[in-house]
Amino acid sequence: MTSEDDYLRKLHVDLIVDRFGFDDWRDLAERSPKEFIVDIVQTSVDNGTVLGSAPGLTGQSKETWFKIKKKEFCFLYHEHSESELSSTKMIL
């Protein structure tokens, strides 16, 4: 189980919201902590998406999804130390 602000949890939530068809959502709900399910629903609300109609399910391949996510992947899902942030700012 991950904490609410954990980057790994955010990655899993985003993957489910963007790629999961919710055909077997009851099984997912039974196997997952309530807080995780709440994060999935809240992320869908924040994104303005309906569960089961994810962009990744409407003709977008996994490869395309990963190419889009790759541009922001590090900043969304990786915790940077202060020194990493400083060096990144210098490069940008």
Image (spheres, rainbow, N blue to C red):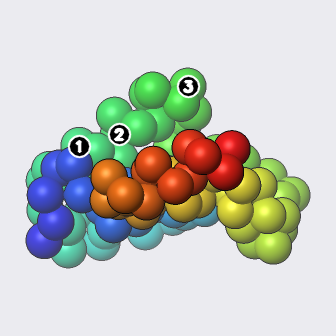
Characterize the local packing of mark 3: few (<14), some (14-19) or many (20 or more) Cα atoms within 10 angstroms.
few
Residue 57 in sight from this viewpoint: no
x and y, in percent, of residue 65 in the image: 75, 61
Q: What element carries label 2?
A: helix
Quadrant assignment, res 24: bottom left
x and y, in percent, of residue 69 in the image: 68, 57
Label 1 to label 2: alpha-carbon separation: 5 Å
Q: In this view, does 67 lie to the left or right of 88?
A: right
Residue 74 in sight from this viewpoint: yes
Q: What element carries label 1?
A: helix
Whichever of labels 1 and 3 marks the residue nearer the N terminus, that label is 1
Characterize the local packing of mark 2: few (<14), some (14-19) or many (20 or more) Cα atoms within 10 angstroms.
some
Which residue does the numbered mark 2 point to in the structure image?
A: 41
x and y, in percent, of residue 57 in the image: 72, 58
Residue at 79%, 64% in the rendered image: 67
Instruction: Indicate the quadrant containing the N terminus: top left, top right, bottom left or bottom right.
Output: bottom left
Q: In this view, does 79 lie to the left or right of 75?
A: left
Residue at 30%, 72% in the rendered image: 27
Residue type beneath disc 2: Val
x and y, in percent, of residue 70 in the image: 69, 62
Q: What element carries label 3?
A: loop
Q: In this view, does 34 lie to the left or right of 22?
A: left
Whichever of labels 2 and 3 marks the residue nearer the N terminus, that label is 2
Res. 38 mark: 1
Q: Viewer-proximal residue, 48 or 30?
A: 48
Res. 48 mark: 3
Residue type beneath disc 3: Gly
